[in-house]
Image (tube, rainbow, N blue to C red):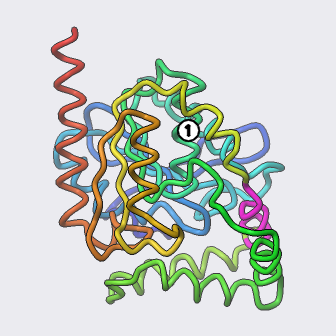
Amino acid sequence: MSIVATNATTLYLDRPTGRIAYSLLGDGPLIICLPGMGDVRSVYRFLAKSLADAGFRVATMDLRGHGDSDATFDVYDDVAAGTDLIALAEHLGRPSILIGNSMGAGAAVWAAAEVPKLTTGLVLIGPFVRNPKTNTLTKLMFRLALLRPWGPAVWKAYFRTLYPARRNAEFDAHFAEISENLRKPGHWDAFHKTTRTSHDTVEARLGEVHTSTLVVMGEKDPDFTDPKTEAHWIADQLNGEVLIVPGAGHYPQAEFPEIVSPAVVEFVRRIMQSKEIQQ
């Protein structure tokens, strides 16, 4: 059961080879939130509530083979996740602001390039929109580390390092949900397939994205050699804005919601005001 929000019902979007789980909160202009690899949609529990309270309809969805989504898919990469974003926006019947974390950010960028009319803005958190620079040996060691039987323990140990500043009782509940998710039939195999995602297809389409963008990066995100430089590089490609969250890791929206939530609410409000002026 997800802790995404109090009284949030799990809904399902039928896709050709499985179902995508999502929840809805609030009413108003649509915002769709997609988490990253190994995570579940409850990572948006604080941000979703803040956005709903601010007058938005917020859909938080799980990646394929993660959370309450099925693990019956053949493909688990950025493009597949991007097609799920598009399908959910079409299903809910309106353009949306897309919020993506980690590889979810890459999927959001791809979706914005693929169907521009469905995207009214982007918020990219700890975003992977290109492959990190690493050598072949490091890639091989990473893949070996995630093999059974030790793979789940290795991932969970690494996941904890992605929250360098805060790991309290609230984090423990979220971590327990992720651990439970990995034990579901087929979910570890789906996660392992997701780790093989290449972001080359996303990087190739950065120049096709022309929408308001906010890049949110944790100052101490261990997934990047230089988080600040990466954030500004992405913002430069997309003519976007940057928010660096002091002390935060890969999930600043959950680690420092008191910083991220107000900034995102203000950003999406500006987008809506701009749309109203244009109309």
The region drawn magenta spans 188-197
Is 18 in front, or is 113? 113
Residue found at x 49% / y 84%: 161
- In this rendering, the answer to whether 124 lies above or below 155 is above
Is 262 in front, or is 226? 226
- Judged left or right of residue 162, residue 240 is left
For the image, the number of numbered tags is 1
Query: Circle 1 sits on which residue?
Result: 85
Residue found at x 47% / y 18%: 117
- Judged left or right of residue 180, residue 265 is left
Residue found at x 44% / y 69%: 250
- Chief SS of the magenta region: helix
Residue 189 in magenta stretch: yes
SS class, disc 1: helix
Residue 138 in magenta stretch: no
- In this rendering, the answer to whether 79 lies above or below 258 is above
Is 230 in front, or is 274? 230
Q: Where residue 226 sits: x, y (%)?
A: 46, 66
